[in-house]
């Protein structure tokens, strides 16, 4: 049985920020909040607090 890989919070935060920026630039949309799996913490890691 394989084990889950550890979460790299810095990489997750960077990837989240990149996705948010791409959507904002392409569609002129900016989220007012983010929803995600609690294993990754809260939106504060991406600088988006509700």
Image (cartoon, rainbow, N blue to C red):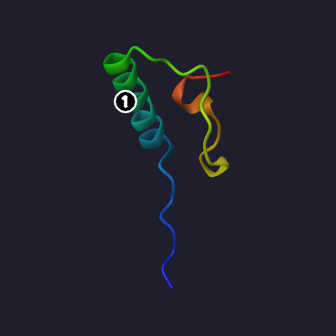
| Up-down relation of residue 13 to residue 30 (above or below) | below
| Up-down relation of residue 12 to residue 32 (above or below) | below
Residue in the foreground of this view, choosing between 41 and 26: 26
Residue in the foreground of this view, choosing between 25 and 9: 25
**Is 43 positioned to the left or the right of 29 in the image?**
right
**Is 6 positioned to the left or the right of 25 in the image?**
right
> Which quadrant of the rendered structure holds the C terminus?
top right
Residue 45: name its quadrant: top right
The residue at the point 39 percent across, 14 percent down is 28
**Is 4 positioned to the left or the right of 40 in the image?**
left
In this figure, what is the number of numbered marks?
1
Residue 21: name its quadrant: top left
The residue at the point 39 percent across, 18 percent down is 24
The residue at the point 33 percent across, 17 percent down is 25
Instruction: Identify the residue at the far top of this view.
Output: 28
Neighbourhood count class around disc 1 (C-alpha, 10 Å): few under 14, some 14–19, many 20 upward = few
The residue at the point 45 percent across, 17 percent down is 29
The spot of residue 6 in percent (x, y) is: 51, 59
| Up-down relation of residue 15 to residue 6 (above or below) | above
The spot of residue 41 in percent (x, y) is: 64, 42
The spot of residue 12 in percent (x, y) is: 46, 42
Residue highlighted by disc 1? 18
Q: For mark 1, give the secondary structure.
A: helix
Instruction: Identify the residue at the far front of this view.
Output: 27
Instruction: Identify the residue at the far left of this view.
Output: 26
| Up-down relation of residue 40 to residue 2 (above or below) | above
């Amino acid at each position: 049985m394989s084990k889950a890989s550890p979460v790299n919070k810095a990489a997750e935060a960077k990837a989240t920020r990149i996705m948010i920026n791409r959507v904002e630039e392409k569609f002129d949309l900016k989220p007012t909040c983010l929803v995600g799996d609690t294993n990754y913490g809260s939106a504060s890691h991406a600088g988006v607090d509700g």
